[in-house]
Amino acid sequence: MHTFPRTATRLGSAKRSMHALLLFLMLLFATAAPAQEWHYTVRPGDNLWDVSTRYLSAVDYWPKLQALNGVTDPEHLPPGTKLRIPVAWLKRLPAKALVLAVQGQVQALIASTNKRVAVDPGLFLHQGDILGTGPDSNVTLRFADGSRVLLQADSELRLVILNARAQTPLVETRARLEKGRADSEVMPRTTGAGNRYEIWTPAAHSAVRGTRYRISMDPATATSRLEVLEGLVELQGGRKTRSIPQGFGSLAETGKPPLMP
């Protein structure tokens, strides 16, 4: 009778152990890092096809939505049922920023026409537009989620991303402060994962989930400064992120990590 050498047996056992270890790590990672989700409450008359058409970026996602939620009858959903929907599957729709107040001379470069216009209260701005304030001037914007930013004098702010996720309260706001100072009042996150509010500068960028803070950019010294009035702000620069708590501030030079709070 033929028998395998002991070396081959040990190698086979080692491979099986390695495969088991890899499988365990994959499962552990999947458990520790779940996808961001939005929960939809089923209304009378809803079916999986209608929900997918209304909210998802592609109708082809409905079989995945059925499997994720263990739906047995996709044509008849019990009202009140909570459907888990990954944020990444939701449609992205353009959002707007409303000009609430203006002091002094403020102009905007409109991305769709490439023309400069005077900024007055009631004007809607869109993704790609650039705001500029002169001396002794400022402007206040309100974003789709209710968050506000006050752009101070001698500042320039580009509205990089203004998105809403389908017909949901989830909003993504990203702006780039080229120079000057911006004071933000960010609405608290009350709808689960998915809301994003970020202001970038050439030296660093900030990400928050409901807080009040100031961020500035000085092109002459290539330096960005941040002060946190309420909540917590993540400040990233030079491939390093620091958490800046309420009552503290930090400074970041272009290409370098932010200083300790």
Image (cartoon, rainbow, N blue to C red):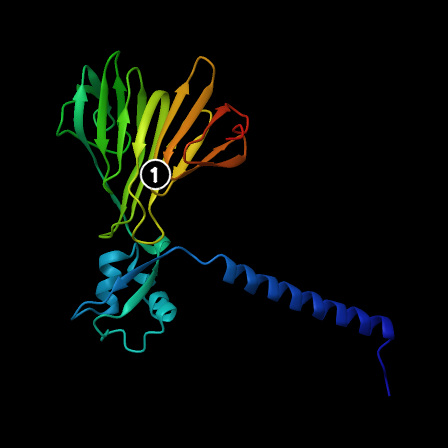
Residue 29 falls left or right of residue 207: right
- Left or right of residue 155: residue 23: right
Q: Is residue 25 left or right of residue 202?
A: right
Residue shown at 42% from the left, 27% from the top? 226
Q: Is residue 61 left or right of residue 5?
A: left
In the rendering, at what x and y percent does residue 137 appear? 23, 16
Q: Disc 1 marks which amino acid?
A: Thr
Few, some or many C-alpha atoms within 10 Å of disc 1 (few <14, some 14-19, many ≥20)?
A: some
In percent of width and height, residue 68 lies at 38, 68
Q: Residue furthest bottom?
A: 1
Q: Residue at x 47, y 25 (%)?
A: 203
Residue at 24%, 66% in the rendered image? 49
Q: Quadrant of the N terminus?
A: bottom right
Residue tagged 1: 211
Total marks in image: 1
Please indicate, yes or no, whether residue 114 appears anywhere in the rendered image.
Answer: no
- State whether residue 118 is above or below residue 261: above
- Place residue 231 in its image quadrant: top left
Q: Position of residue 7 (x, y in %)?
A: 85, 70
Q: Which quadrant of the view contains residue 206?
A: top left
Q: Residue 26, located in which quarter of the rendered image? A: bottom right
Q: Nearer the viewer, residue 42 or 188?
A: 188
Q: Position of residue 10 (x, y in %)?
A: 81, 71
Which element carries disc 1, helix, strand or loop? loop
